[in-house]
Amino acid sequence: MIGEHNENILSDMLPTYYARQFPQNIFCRWLACGSSPQPLCNRELSFTLADDVYLRYLSISHQKDLQTLLQKKCPHKLDVGAVYNTKPSVGRHDAVVISRELVFDIDLTDYDEIRTCCQEARVCEKCWKFMVIACEIIDKALKDDFGFQSILWVFSGRRGIHCWVSDYEARTLDSPGRGAIADYLCLIVGGENQSKKVHLGNENLHSSIRRALNIIDKYFEQLLQDQEFLATDKLNSFLKLILDDALKSQVETTLKKMQEPSLNKWNTFINIYENYCRENGNVIRKIKYLIEEIKIQYCYPRLDVNVTKGFNHLLKSPFSIHPKTGKVSVVFKSANAKNLKIDEIPTIYSLLDDSVAENNQHETNMKAAVKIFQELVFALEKTEAMRKRSDANTSLDF
């Protein structure tokens, strides 16, 4: 097994990692496509160095610049920002944002009120299912509802996932447009003091909500068993999601007597709910989608909407090393999120130390992640070339 992470030796290892493992060429090509039609040098990068020294408004003109910067500064963390109308270091006070990938940040700490296996920075196979559901729901919505194609999924390096949408239409969205997409994808609303955070009303459900529920249903029973949402010490939180007092009383009386696992309690709750609706037709409209609302509150993606709406938030680069774990922020396909194992994600130690037992497997996983990244960038370059030809032809026709 890999030894304990030691942040103090990162500075010694990072130069070798950046020279041997970090995919500099394809990374620069990705940035260039995302910068177009502005030059690559108008893209902001930031470095976090040892002792949390933070450098903003960095930029590069080509791969050699990046290579020089990485070796000279040896960043413990590399973040990517927006594209400006000028070189960010020159116009840092007056520069105007021209474009930026549409980004989403999902962190497992936002699930701490519902996950029981881990808390805060810890993550395991059980709570990773929340990230799998989030990835599948958001990826499907971005493709089916908005028509985006260039969608990059990246493990954050510690406890979450990031999504970068590089389509030209996504990159050039203004802040209200980004906010509209974020709001469309948000179904969980309310702060820590609000118990019930999902209200679907009584009209027919939107197709996107039904699609999300179909995805949730693939994992819901397993999550019930893994997280024990209806365990005795969690039951009061569950009951607060039932706003009909008579129904809540029936459910509370029955479930508090049960010693069975959460899955059994859930099935009992379903039976009580269905019988209650049959016997009380006058209240059906008020609790029409109670089952769906509960499933969404427990399982639906919890987005940091401020990251999506704004332009100032820089996001960790693909293949950056997370300074707190040593893990690589690997790229993965949305369809393979469920197969991603936290223990199998490459670390800077497993990649650079041939004597580590995981070295061969992690080298293979790293190459697979780089290949996924390459395929996305090649497709993006092709799309950008077609867009530019189309724009040129339109200009000539005019």
Image (cartoon, grey):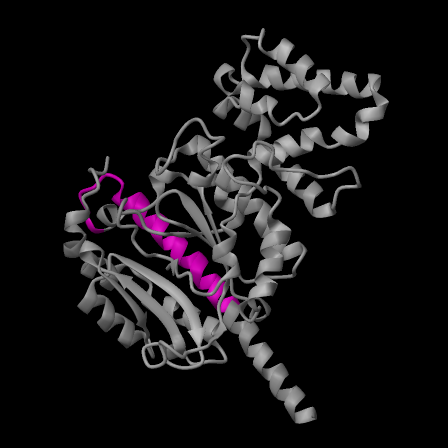
Residue 357 is inside the magenta segment:
yes
Q: Residue at x 59, y 78 (%)?
A: 387
With respect to residue 311, does 321 lie above or below? above
* In the rendered image, the vertical position of residue 37 relative to residue 115, given as above or below: below
The region drawn magenta spans 352-379
Q: Position of residue 145 (x, y in %)?
A: 67, 56
Q: Of 116 and 130, which appears nearest the observer?
A: 116
Was residue 361 drawn as part of the magenta stretch in this picture?
A: yes
**Can residue 162 be seen?**
yes
Residue at point 83% right, 19% down? Answer: 280
* Residue positioned 40% across, 53% down in the render: 369
Residue 152 is at least partly visible in this image: no
Q: In this view of the protein, which residue sits in the foreground, 243 or 149?
A: 243
The x and y percentages for residue 71 are 20, 67
Toward the viewer: 392 or 174? 174
Which residue appears at 38% of the width and 58% of the height?
318
> Front-most of 164 and 67?
164
Most distant residue in the right direction: 281
Quarter of the rendering occupied by the C terminus:
bottom right
